[in-house]
Amino acid sequence: MNRNLGATKLRRRRRPVDPMHSYDNLPKPLRNWLSQAALPWSPTSARRIWNRAEAQGQSVQDALRALSRAEAQTLARDRPLIREIHTP
C-alpha cells in the first residue's frame, strides 16, 4: 500500500521514536517549514539539516534555504519515476 507517498522509488523507513513528540520539540521556524514541505520529512532528518546549519553559524533563513535545497535534490532524484508515470 502506498499510503500518502504515492508512486516513488525513494526509501521508506520505520522510525523507532514517536514522530509527533519529535515534531513538537522542533524549533517553530522548522515546524512551519515542514508544514509546507513537498515531501513527508521525518523530524529527525529535518533536525539534522537544521543542526548542521546552526553549527556552521548560519541564520534561520540560511537553515531554511538548506532544507529547501535538500528537498529539491531529493525531488530531482525522484523525477525520472514521475516522467515514467506521466509519459503517454
Image (cartoon, helix red, strand yellow):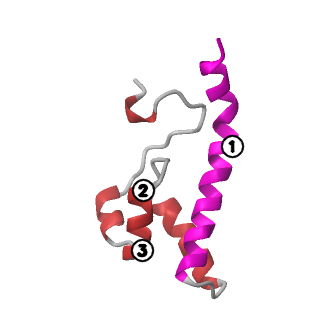
**Helix or strand or loop: what does disc 1 sit on?**
helix
Residue at left offset 47%, top offset 54%: 37
Reading the chain from its start, which is encountered first: label 2 or label 3?
3
Q: Amino acid at mark 2?
A: Gln
Question: In the image shown, does 40 or 21 lie closer to the viewer?
Answer: 40
* Residues at circles 2 and 1 in contact by the CB criterion of under 8 Å: no
- Read off the residue under disc 3: 29
- Read off the residue under disc 2: 36
Reading the chain from its start, which is encountered first: label 2 or label 1?
2
- Read off the residue under disc 1: 76
Question: In the image shown, does 61 or 5 lie closer to the viewer?
Answer: 61
Quadrant of the frame with the N terminus = top left
Residue 69 counted in the magenta span: yes
Residue at left offset 62%, top offset 44%: 75
Q: Tell me, yes or no, if residue 76 can be seen here.
A: yes
Dividing the picture into quarters, in which one does residue 70 lie? bottom right
Relative image position of residue 83 (x, y in whole percent): 67, 25
Q: Amino acid at mark 3?
A: Pro
Q: Amino acid at mark 1?
A: Ala
**Helix or strand or loop: what does disc 2 sit on?**
helix
Residue at left offset 60%, top offset 31%: 9
Sort mark 1 into few (<14), some (14-19) or many (20+) by Cα contacts within 10 Å.
Answer: few
Q: Which residues are magenta?
A: 60-88
